[in-house]
Image (spheres, rainbow, N blue to C red):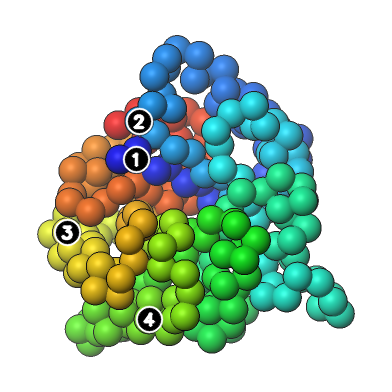
Amino acid sequence: MKKIFAANWKLQKTPAQAKEFCETFRAQLVAHTYFWDHKEVFIFPQNFSLDTVIHATNDTPVFVGPQNIHFEKSGAFTGENSAAFAKDMGAKTILLGHSERRQFFGETNEALNKKVKLCQELDLLPVFCIGETLAQREANETEKVCFEQLTQSLNGIDKSKRMIVAYEPVWAIGTGKVATVAQVKEIHEKLYHKMSDLNFTNFQLLYGGSVKPDNAQELLQVPHVDGFLIGGAALEVDSFMKICSH
């Protein structure tokens, strides 16, 4: 199974900066002859840079998509993003359920369920985020919270279609704190068995939360860690390539 390296640029990178990143990234890949035999790369740019990244990677296997969509294809939803329009532009994937969307924009499991179903309808690959806050972890609610996010948000979808789930402990996102190998191993094993119990047949599990070049190799050795969802360390080509090289 190929390892997945997904870059979430959040509210970063102008179109010019995004183009420069993609061109530099592609130039570095020249020295990695068999890179695509073992790895998959996803890039989630800010929406104004989406078209630029799609065109800058259109002759590569890179999956590109927006960081959020509305659950309707079109309509009177000022300020929202259309999955159908993104697909028409060339997007192949959508990032859904990131903790910042839940925290700052009030996204619910019910709304995310509609978004996942729309992605499947349009044959767009969902990268679906789950994770607990520090208070929830300290209350020993990690498993409860993550399982609720999975079961409620993925209820009624086609479980035979490919699904990528990214576990990101909220307390480790952008804080420099990283879940210990033991913590990652425990929750990823539970998530793997939960997805299997829910009858998903084609899924991968990513870890996210202050992933950097110096901890990537150790985390990739953890069973059921199929890759990473990377924030800050994916903003620079050198650090992103170092992570991808593992």
Helix, strand or loop at label 3? It is helix
**Cα distance in 3D space between marks 2 and 3:** 22 Å
Three-letter amino acid code of the residue under disc 2: His
Q: Position of residue 76 (x, y in %)?
A: 86, 80
Q: Is residue 76 above or below residue 180?
A: below
Q: In the rendered structure, are the residues bearing label 3 and label 4 in contact, judged by CB atoms less than 8 Å apart?
A: no
Q: Position of residue 117 (x, y in %)?
A: 57, 72
Q: Quadrant of residue 104?
A: bottom right
> Which numbered disc covers residue 32?
none
The residue at which mark 1 appears reads as: 3
Q: Quadrant of residue 37?
A: top left
Query: Sequence order check: which comes first, mark 1 or mark 4?
Result: 1
99 to the left or right of 204? right
**Cα distance in 3D space between marks 3 and 4:** 21 Å
The 10 Å Cα crowd at callout 2, few under 14, some 14 to 19, many 20 or more, is: few
**Cα distance in 3D space between marks 2 and 4:** 31 Å
Q: Position of residue 237 (x, y in %)?
A: 52, 31
The residue at which mark 4 appears reads as: 151
The residue at which mark 2 appears reads as: 38
176 to the left or right of 232? left
144 to the left or right of 27? left
Where's the C terminus, which quadrant? top left
Q: Can residue 68 be seen from the camera position used here? A: no
Closer to us: 107 or 200: 200
**Cα distance in 3D space between marks 1 and 3:** 17 Å
The residue at which mark 3 appears reads as: 185
